Image (cartoon, helix red, strand yellow):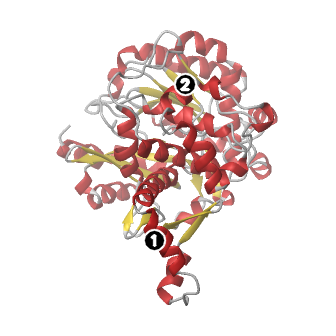
């Protein structure tokens, strides 16, 4: 898609207004690509979260980041009271609304199956009393069923965090119609329905362009779902319903309270105790390991360290940064073991200089393991940051060449959940008990034969849910 066309699309007054109205108060993400690389942006250069308050801001964002050719605009599941710093994104009290969204992914060629799944979810919402506050988005290669975040009364929102409501309602509805969904999903190996509600999740903004397809994100109300055609999403002649803004305050109260009672709220709050993983409905298929290549120890260490950090904090972006950081650190330490030992001895009794003090202030403790972070919040070694996209390139892409990365990631999470929390918080125990036994046989022992390493029931990891993909 020519970038001049992308600019013309977003400079359209209707497009700007739709994107801005949906994204106001949300944490924004831009996705694009320059020189063939995929870029995902969520912060200004000074570290402030991206946001949009008015239609003009849409133009401004595209101009400011023109160098990376942004194409898709996303808005967070949460609507915030303030969006001026990273710290505000971590404060549950700063969330004033959260949108319940059911994510349906599939193949464009089988779009009718995707719409059928959306129809099942819409029908279940109607049974729960949610009608006028519901809309559907065709995102490009899938659909999102939305419940307007303002359909819950102030009384309910004052008693339950909006993210607890959104997560619970999505999970509750999927559980209620799981049997019907499985029947449809089983027809396609690519069709997937899941609860993707988490603290930093984003969804495509209305009329935003798809990241790959020559399509834009159009909204429509449930009453026309049987008439939907993919042609509605043609960016040059889109058919889009601006009534996605419609809601009835209080319409979602009864459903929200039932969901909270049944599910118990969001499972990813820092320090939360996990009871049950989020719902993912996907057609079962065997794991296929490609014949060529083998996972190196560097990739196994990076993957396990990323999964470790994610289970401990729930932060996927920083987990990737941490995973690559630790993989580089241990690879270097192995080659310079004697030098490391001498450096440790040389520091004993050394005066604390201003430089050393400043460095220690940037230290982050993951259990008893210490790593350093940059001013932007990414883990670093020396003056080099390890960013999420670096992890994708050096760890995830390499793993993908041997086995589907998502399979490896899910297997790593389940494997780590079999250990007690104290093991994941202890640097030496993690290395000896978690990493060493599988460093040369991760695919065989963790992905393909997980039962081979099944833990005793009392050793199960139960204090954080698996949240991402991502």
CA gap between label 1 and label 2 equals 37 Å
Q: Is residue 309 above or below residue 136?
A: below
Q: Residue at x 68, y 47 (%)?
A: 162
Of residues 80 and 347, which is closer to you in this image?
347
Q: Residue at x 50, y 69 (%)?
A: 341
Within-10-Å neighbours for mark 1: few <14, some 14–19, many 20+: few
In the image: residue 302, left or right of residue 88: left
Of residues 183 and 84, which is closer to you in this image?
183
* Identity of the residue furthest to the front in this view: 338
Residue 282: % across, % down: 54, 20
Secondary element at image label 1: loop
Q: Residue 258: in sight, yes or no?
A: no
**Which quadrant holds residue 404?**
top left
Residue position for label 1: 375
Q: Is residue 364 above or below residue 61?
A: below
**Which quadrant holds residue 436?**
top right
Q: Which residue is drawn at 74% across and 36% down?
A: 460
Residue 45: % across, % down: 37, 66
Of residues 290 and 130, which is closer to you in this image?
290
Residue 455: % across, % down: 72, 32
Of residues 145 and 202, which is closer to you in this image?
202
> Which badge, 1 or 2, comes first in the chain's sequence?
2
Residue 20: % across, % down: 43, 51
Residue position for label 2: 193
Secondary element at image label 2: strand
Within-10-Å neighbours for mark 2: few <14, some 14–19, many 20+: many
Q: Residue at x 20, y 37 (%)?
A: 1
Mark 1 or 2, which is nearer the eye?
1
In the image: residue 396, left or right of residue 199: left
Label pair 1/2, CB-CB below 8 angstroms: no
């Amino acid at each position: 898609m020519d970038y001049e066309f992308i600019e013309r699309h977003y400079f359209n007054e209707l497009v700007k207004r739709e994107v801005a109205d949906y994204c106001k108060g949300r944490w924004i993400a831009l996705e694009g690509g320059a020189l063939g690389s995929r870029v995902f942006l969520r912060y200004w250069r000074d570290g402030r979260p991206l946001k949009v308050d008015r239609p003009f801001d849409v133009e401004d964002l595209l101009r400011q980041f023109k160098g990376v050719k942004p194409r898709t605009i996303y808005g967070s599941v949460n609507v915030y009271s303030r969006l001026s710093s990273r710290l505000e994104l971590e404060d549950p009290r700063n969330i004033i609304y959260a949108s319940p969204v059911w994510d349906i992914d599939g193949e464009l060629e089988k779009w009718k199956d995707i719409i059928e799944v959306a129809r099942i979810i819409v029908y279940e919402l109607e049974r729960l009393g949610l009608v006028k506050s519901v809309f559907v988005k065709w995102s490009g290669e899938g659909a999102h069923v939305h419940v307007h975040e303002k359909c819950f009364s102030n009384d309910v929102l004052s008693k339950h965090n909006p993210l607890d409501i959104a997560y619970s309602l999505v999970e509750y509805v999927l559980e209620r119609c799981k049997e019907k969904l499985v029947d449809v999903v089983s027809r396609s190996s690519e069709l997937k329905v899941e609860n993707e509600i988490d603290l930093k999740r984003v969804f495509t903004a209305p009329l935003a362009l798809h990241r790959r397809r020559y399509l834009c994100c159009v909204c429509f109300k449930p009453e026309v779902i049987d008439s939907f055609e993919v042609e509605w999403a043609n960016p040059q002649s889109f058919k889009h319903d601006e009534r996605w803004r419609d809601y009835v305050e209080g319409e979602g109260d009864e459903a929200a309270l039932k969901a909270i009672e049944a599910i118990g709220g969001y499972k990813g709050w820092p320090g939360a105790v996990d009871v049950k993983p989020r719902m993912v409905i996907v057609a079962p298929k065997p794991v296929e390991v490609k014949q060529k290549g083998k996972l190196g120890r560097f990739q196994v260490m990076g993957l396990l360290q990323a999964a470790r950090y994610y289970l401990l904090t729930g932060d996927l972006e920083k987990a990737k940064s941490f995973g690559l950081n630790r993989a580089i650190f241990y690879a270097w330490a192995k080659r310079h073991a004697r030098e490391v030992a001498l450096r440790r001895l040389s520091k004993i009794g050394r005066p604390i200089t201003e430089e050393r003090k400043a460095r220690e202030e940037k230290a982050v403790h993951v259990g008893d393991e210490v790593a350093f972070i940059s001013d932007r919040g990414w883990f670093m070694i020396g003056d080099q940051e390890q960013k999420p996209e670096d992890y994708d390139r050096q760890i995830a892409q390499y793993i993908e060449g041997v086995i589907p990365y998502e399979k490896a990631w899910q297997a790593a999470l389940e494997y780590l959940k079999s250990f007690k929390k104290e093991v994941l918080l202890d640097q030496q125990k993690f290395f000896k008990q978690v990493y060493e036994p599988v460093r040369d046989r991760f695919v065989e022992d963790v992905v393909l034969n997980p039962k081979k390493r099944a833990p005793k029931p009392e050793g199960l990891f139960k204090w954080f849910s698996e949240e991402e993909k991502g």
